Image: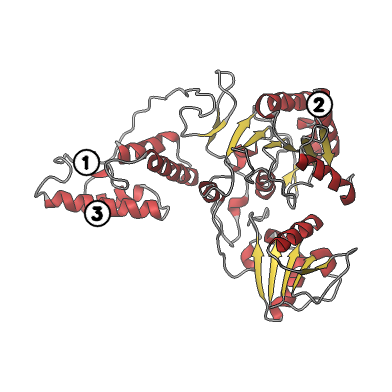
Amino acid sequence: MPCLFIVPDEPLIDQTIKTATKFGLKCGVIKSGRKEDRSQKLQIAGIDTLINRKFPLAEIVFADEAHVSYSPTWRKVLEYYWQMGSVVIGLTATPYRTNPKEGLGEIYDCLVQAPQMADLIEMGRLCPFKYFGFPKLDLSRVRKTKGDYDKEDLAVVVDTDLACEQIVGEWEQKASHLKTIAYTVSLNHSDRLQAAFQAKGYNAVCVDGRLENDARSPIYAGFASGGKFDPQILISVDVLEKGFDEPSVACIIQARPTMSRIKYRQQIGRGSRKYPGKEYCIVLDYAGNAYRFGFVTSRQQVSLDKDKASAPGTAPIKACSRESGGCGALLHLSVMVCPHCSYQFPVRNKKVNYNYSMVALAPRVASGNTELEDWIAFYREVAQRSFKKELPPGNAIALFHQKFSATPAPDITKGAIFGENPSDNQKNLYRAYLQRQALRSSKDLEWVGQYMKLEFG
């Protein structure tokens, strides 16, 4: 069966060829400067070359980085294959559009969602992350152009000696032994950050549009080998966001604020690969992007519809305050003890008022108390269904009140999902579920704590 695999950039061609070879697949390549072999059933093509060549026969067409297939060039190619009756499959880890008026549903018929990053981490396929932040930047005077921050305005804020020295100082404390990629605003910003690293004796190299592809290859090879005289830090402007796959990367520096969820997730994704001896990837977020988009491990609402959710917002994240003796880690609002430095966040004493009066009940499932057993069975069924289907935890209370004109007391709520003796892992799973719900509905840590108490006492 003839297949066509289309990619937007040249680095992705080499990466796709490498993967195909790994699985024993022979392929032809359609890319300017490379010899074609149309006899192979699998053809790998760069979109910029393909649009100017004769389209190969293909029963199945894969569109890599499918979020960019909204462009006229991509749509012209895909339209041709749709008319030929080919099956078109789009592949992307970032199914978003910056423009809320655009939706991938205008191109694709249905969405098949693969495991999300949090799932892959739980499966052991990707490594976890540790986030560390800096004081929030004042971007109030930075203009917005083409759906993102204006680069010239950003440079005034972040392209300074002080900012670069702060980044290097924090990196020395947290990640000086780790292979690192830093993302910057401009070429000048890259040069300034490189100079700050070199002033401390570290080998940092800029990888950007000033280097031809042939000149980048030895740099990548040296970075991968990790030799004494090889670069430890790669500094990039719009180059190493996709098509670069080096699993040993264990630190990502975000020195460029962005309004693009795609750019944010692609950059941090460079550090997500598993590698021997690599326990986690450190993210040094100088740009404040985590506050806009949340952690990359947070559950994402994905849709082919016109996607207003792709725009930045305010994530439920707080910093482990350095001023108060913390380490600067970025954490979910519900975390009360920093897992990195054991800093304890102060507890706000806030009285919670309930609208419903609690119903006094006999001990749990008292012998012969069929009414209580019915109440427990009903609440348990709804609570478990809500948890399994990622529905709001308040559904069980609301439906219970609707059916019995009462609010379930602790004898009913405790252990409804995990039973009388929950494990620490089950508690962590439930807390993660509540945190996802809190993120979706803008709830705070007290809300999370309330439902943890209902389930576990």
User: Neighbour class for label 3 at 10 Å: few (<14), some, many (≥20)?
Assistant: some
**Badge 1 is on which residue?**
411
Above or below, 16 against 368 in this view is: below
**Badge 2 is on which residue?**
196
SS state under label 2 = helix
Above or below, 51 against 392 in this view is: below
From the viewer's perspective, tell me whether residue 132 is left or right of residue 431: right
Q: Residue at x 68, y 45 (%)?
A: 247
Residue 394 horizontal/vertical position (percent): 35, 47
Q: CA distance from mark 1 to mark 3?
A: 13 Å
SS state under label 3 = helix
Residue 222 horizontal/vertical position (percent): 81, 41
SS state under label 1 = helix
Q: CA distance from mark 2 to mark 3?
A: 63 Å
From the viewer's perspective, tell me whether residue 447 is left or right of residue 307: left
Q: Quadrant of residue 202?
A: top right
Quadrant of the image containing the N terminus: bottom right
**Badge 3 is on which residue?**
378
